[in-house]
Image (cartoon, grey):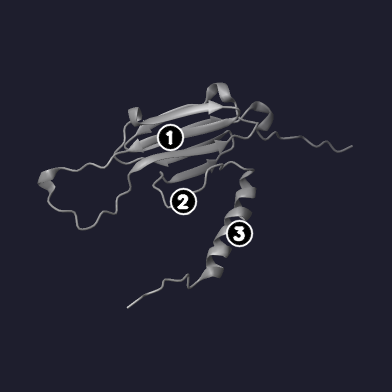
Amino acid sequence: MLVRRTNTFPHLTLLQRRFGTMTAGNWGGLFESPAPAATGRWAPAMDVIEQEDQILLRAELPGLTEEDVEITLEDNKLTLKGEKTFQHDASDGHYRRIESGYGSFRRVFTLPTAVDQEHIDAQFRNGVLVISLPKAEQAKPKKIEVTVN
């Protein structure tokens, strides 16, 4: 018997694509590379947190060390890349299911021009990489006093 697979929800795929495009604009193009779910490949989950004086990028990298990850900055683009290898021991037995992700990844973020690139900092602790992008002075909010005559 021949079984044909069809996309039962073609409109859902289109809606997901349009929503992704719409929300990407709100971050001013911060995300250059697509989210992992969009590519079908493994990539670390990323959080972007904007604070008053900095932007934080937080990447979940379970099973990796700082030696497994490379961070580069070129032409106002921050690139995070690395590889998570599949750990297999013959004494483990026969795998019936593998849900953990592994493989190489590459994420690119276009930085806002108001980031102090000389003071970017990265800390790796307990499988979480946190990259701190301090805002340049001109990007920080300033309080303006209003005088009444």
Where's the C terminus, which quadrant? top right
Q: Mark 1–mark 2 contact, CB under 8 Å?
A: no
Task: Give the mark, 1 or 3, whose residue is nearer the N terminus.
Answer: 3
At a point 67% along the width and 32% down the height, the residue shown is 139
**Residue type (three-letter) at the residue carrying disc 1:** Lys
Residues at marks 2 and 3, CA–CA distance in whole angstroms: 16 Å
x and y, in percent, of residue 11 in the image: 56, 69
Name the secondary structure under disc 1: strand
Task: Give the mark, 2 or 3, whose residue is nearer the N terminus.
Answer: 3
x and y, in percent, of residue 87 in the image: 22, 41
Q: Which residue is under mark 1?
A: 81
For the image shown, how many numbered marks are present on the structure? 3
Where's the N terminus, which quadrant? bottom left
Q: Residues within 10 Å of mark 1 (few under 14, many from 20)?
A: some
Q: Mark 1–mark 3 contact, CB under 8 Å?
A: no
Q: Which image quadrant for residue 146? A: top right
x and y, in percent, of residue 52 in the image: 59, 37
Residues at marks 1 and 2, CA–CA distance in whole angstroms: 15 Å
Q: Mark 2–mark 3 contact, CB under 8 Å?
A: no
User: Which disc, if any, is residue 18?
Assistant: 3
Toward the top, the furthest residue is 118
Side (left or right) of 20 relative to 35: right
At a point 36% along the width and 40% down the height, the residue shown is 61
For this rendering, which residue is in front, 53 or 45? 45
Toward the right, the furthest residue is 149
Name the secondary structure under disc 3: helix
Q: Which residue is under mark 2?
A: 39
